[in-house]
Image (cartoon, rainbow, N blue to C red):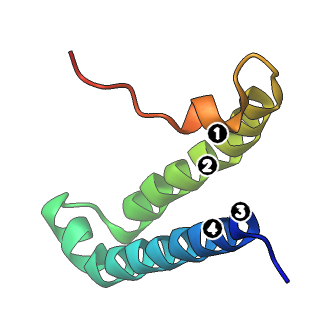
Amino acid sequence: MPSAEDRRARVATTVVFFVTGFVVAAWATRIPEVQQRLALSPGRFAIAVLGLEGGAIVGLPAGAALLARPALGSKAAARVPAER
């Protein structure tokens, strides 16, 4: 029987995957509008999207390296600083 902590982790993971899927679906339906509003040719728009993916390729390993540091950890990294 999974512990309460395991169940919370499972629910949190499910929510994150659901939200990510929703955001990707929303983005995919708006691609033509975004391209038109930015007045980009298909080639230029592809380069812009490639830049987004390139940022993810660089950012994900960098984020993982930060999380692996004992001074930071996942709990501290997940906190959003409050505005002052």
Looking at marks 2 and 3 on the same chain, the residue that comes earlier in the sequence is marked by 3
Q: Are marks 2 and 1 in contact (CB under 8 Å)?
A: yes
Q: Position of residue 72 (x, y in %)?
A: 70, 22
Q: Residue furthest left?
A: 37
Residue 5 numbered mark, or none: 3
Which residue does the numbered mark 4 point to in the structure image? 8
Identity, as a three-letter code, of the amino acid under mark 1: Gly
Question: Quick one: label 3, few (<14), some, or many (20+) residues within 10 Å?
Answer: few
Q: Where is residue 61 in the image (x, y as percent from the top left)?
A: 76, 40
Identity, as a three-letter code, of the amino acid under mark 4: Arg
Q: What is the spatial separation of the Cα atoms under label 4 and label 2, in whole angstroms?
A: 27 Å
Q: What is the spatial separation of the Cα atoms under label 4 and label 1, in whole angstroms?
A: 27 Å
Q: Do the residues labelled 4 and 1 touch (CB within 8 Å)?
A: no
The residue sitting at 19% across, 75% down in the picture is 33
Question: Quick one: label 4, few (<14), some, or many (20+) residues within 10 Å?
Answer: few
- Where is 19 relative to 51, above or below? below
- Element class at badge 3: helix
Residue 59 numbered mark, or none: 1
Identity, as a three-letter code, of the amino acid under mark 2: Ala
Q: Position of residue 57 (x, y in %)?
A: 69, 48
- Element class at badge 1: helix
Q: Nearer the viewer, mark 4 or mark 1?
A: 4
Q: Position of residue 45 (x, y in %)?
A: 38, 62
